[in-house]
Image: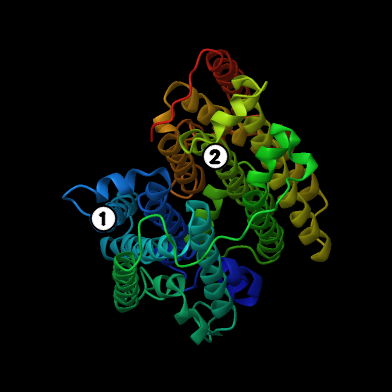
Amino acid sequence: MLLVAAIANPVILLFRGLPSGADEGAFIAFLIVPFLCMLAAFMSSFLAVRHTRAEEESGRAELVGATPAGRMLPTVVTLVHGLVANFALSILTALALIAVGLEAPGSFVVGSAAGVVGVFFLGVGLVAAQFMRTSRGANTVAVTVLLSTYLLAGIGNALGTPSDDLQRMESSWLTWLSPFGWAENSRPFADDDLWPLVLCKLVGLALAATAIVLQSRRDIGSAFVAERPGRADAHPALSTTTALVWRLSAGSIVGWSIGAAISGLLATTLASVVEEIGAENPAVEAILAQITSRQGSIAQGLLTTFFVMIGILAACAAVQTITRARQEETHGTAEPVLASPIDRVRWLADFVVVGFAAVVIILTAGVAAASLGILVNDGDPDLYRGAITVAVGQVVAASVFLVVTALVFVVAPRWTIAAGWTLVLLAAVVGLFGPIFGMPESLTWLSPVAAAPVPVPDGVDVRGLWWLLGAIAVAGAATFGLMRRRELAAGG
């Protein structure tokens, strides 16, 4: 059965959850808990940086600090905001699991696991905002901690000890050094142990308290880590605005591409093992049937599922590129560029072009890693075609987020960041978990990543390709048409 495959393959344990049994609830927790926690971690760390360090960069924090509110209040309010957001996330997650027929205690443990990991990374984001001079640097630190601890939990799981019946894995001590490991060791629908979650929340609150203390010991706008001095002369390639946008975006594109490569490698590694062993447990078999519906094989279905994840990473990169245009505008650095012969349509087009290039690079990294996995594991050659087909489909899906976020940037610039990331979050939830929970196709296809074309035994199922292309064309034309008459909107 699949749990036996997972326990027998360290690569699966490295990037998936912690097996706690073959029951339906425990198996679903094995599939989704790490990714729910990761989504909560991203949300919380970005929220913390956005309302602290980014406010200092824009100069608004200094204005607030000059009022009777004082300079400490924004950090405290951000902490309260993050705690409320993670509490709401916990409740909504639990209610969603209960709604699909899972037991209430285990459902609330899953929700609590996501919430407390969010609290932990809320603290990480607040501390990172104290040390780094820019919001970009603070986000980089927070994401580095996130990915490192996620990998640490995976290594701890892979080095653990399996039970005699190969249904459960006891993680090694390394897992207990990671908030993801604490969340997984709560073992929803099996042990429902709350103590690891209490530990995670307490550490998160301690980090938040540390951030408040650090805030009290520095001036607004300063940081504990000095910025690296820049070059005296710019590289000749930066004479074009396209190269400038690429320079601003290159680091994040590399990071998203590494995540895509890891996911692509895991897709074909996991697929080959599952294809050989299959699923003997009826409940697990039913879940796999939902995941791999109409894909022809479990291997092809899981490949498609993992490439949906890669498509979400590409969508994140696309949204991040457009939100960087908004940041350039609010920080005042776009104005000197637009004062040159570069017109505003060309300026925005450069961000769209680089965003599309990021999408292609990230999906290409996923295909390359998936192909390596097929080659190393002597997988089905048809998986090569499947990987390329679904990757092309996800390029189209991610491009929808790119142009829609660009359109929001033009018509409602203040909503650019919130709208872009909200769309990605909703699409991720529906696209990743809709098939697992048996949502109808008419609902799951509202998510571009789920509506993208996929391979089927007799060809390609185009799914929602035409409405995706139509959305790109309409949103793209509206974006550049309206941008001709749009003035700079420097407000936050």
Q: In this view, does 177 lie above or below 432?
A: below
Q: Quadrant of the N terminus?
A: bottom right
Circle count: 2
Residue 298 appears in the picture as rendered: no
**What scheme was used to colour the molecule?**
rainbow
Q: Position of residue 134 (x, y in %)?
A: 49, 54
Left or right of 356? Residue 419 is left
**Looking at the picture, which amino acid does disc 2 mark?**
Arg
Q: Quadrant of the C terminus?
A: top left
Q: Which residue matches tag 2? A: 324
User: Residue 269 or 340: which is nearer the viewer?
Assistant: 340
Residue 14 appears in the picture as rendered: yes
| Label 2 crowd bin: few (<14), some (14–19), many (20+), radius 10 Å | some
Residue at screen point 41% across, 53% down: 53
Residue 311: image tag: none
Residue at screen point 26% across, 46% down: 64
Q: In this view, does 179 lie above or below 73?
A: below
Q: Where is residue 13 in the image (x, y as percent from the top left)?
A: 58, 72
Tell me which corner region of the image, top left, top right, bottom left or bottom right, holds residue 86: bottom left
Q: Is residue 326 above or below residue 80?
A: above
SS at badge 1: loop
- Distance from label 2 to label 1 (Cα)? 27 Å
Q: Which residue matches tag 1? A: 71
| Label 1 crowd bin: few (<14), some (14–19), many (20+), radius 10 Å | some
